[in-house]
Amino acid sequence: AQKVTQAQTEISVVEKEDVTLDCVYETRDTTYYLFWYKQPPSGELVFLIRRNSFDEQNEISGRYSWNFQKSTSSFNFTITASQVVDSAVYFCALSEWRMDSNYQLIWGAGTKLIIKP
Amino acid sequence: SAVISQKPSRDICQRGTSLTIQCQVDSQVTMMFWYRQQPGQSLTLIATANQGSEATYESGFVIDKFPISRPNLTFSTLTVSNMSPEDSSIYLCSVGLWGAKNIQYFGAGTRLSVL
């Protein structure tokens, strides 16, 4: 069965430190997509990135970077020079294609990131 | 992306009553989903709202308790029926866009408290 594991329940760092959020997934599909979402205290989930299974190139967007490694089934997320505004719960997710030709997302448990000033 | 308006943003309800949550999108979308998120927990999919047909419910969720409507490609409602305190949660609407179906964009959510 498809599964996403975010083993870090909560991480607390001091502002300007780098922090990496881990995501490990399980799937039998050869084609799949991985996602990261941010949920700040306001509650609205914000889409950050989608990565397909054929593209293992790492991605960088400003202070954010993502490391996708199929060999270890991991899709880790690093925030460089963290800021207080990065404080949020971060979810990793995996797309699952279903028999009815629809898809759904399999969600990790989330990692609560606390950035202290 | 899309602008997704969800109403109400929060409500406090009495046991045994029902609440209807609305989700309005500013453009036509292919997929609409309803999730529940209990405090400090991850997201649990309730159902996929299908335009013009009955919603597809996930295991553990039934139509009598969570009736869903989707009359067109921009609007859906979720009703939480005969509420109990266990229904206290955040309810989230999400959408998938044409051409990027498996990216889901979310509304701000409805925080429901049942007394």
Image (cartoon, grey):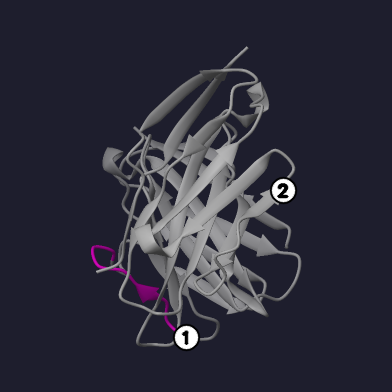
Image quadrant assignment for residue B98: bottom right
**Residue at 63% of width from left, 51% of height from top?**
A48
When the figure is inspected, residue B92 is found, relative to residue B66, above or below; the finding is above
Residues rendered magenta in the picture:
B53-61
Secondary structure state at the residue bearing disc 2? strand
Residue B72's x, y, as percent? Answer: 63, 79
- Disc 1 marks a residue whose amino acid type is Ser
**Residue at 40% of width from left, 28% of height from top?**
A10
Q: Nearer the viewer, mark 2 or mark 1?
A: 2
Q: Is residue A57 within the magenta segment?
A: no
The residue tagged 2 is A61
**Residue at 54% of width from left, 38% of height from top?**
B10
Nearer-the-camera pick, A100 or A57: A57
Nearer-the-camera pick, B71 or A42: A42
Nearer-the-camera pick, A38 or A53: A53
The residue tagged 1 is B53
Residue B41's x, y, as percent? Answer: 36, 41
Check if mark 2's residue and mark 1's residue have beta carbons within 8 Å: no
**Most frequent secondary structure within the magenta stretch:** loop
When the figure is inspected, residue A3 is found, relative to residue A109, above or below; the finding is below
Question: Are there few (<14), some (14-19), or many (20+) residues within 10 Å of tag 1?
Answer: few
- Chain letter, disc 1 residue: B
When the figure is inspected, residue A89 is found, relative to residue A94, above or below; the finding is above
Q: Quadrant of the N terminus of chain A?
A: bottom left
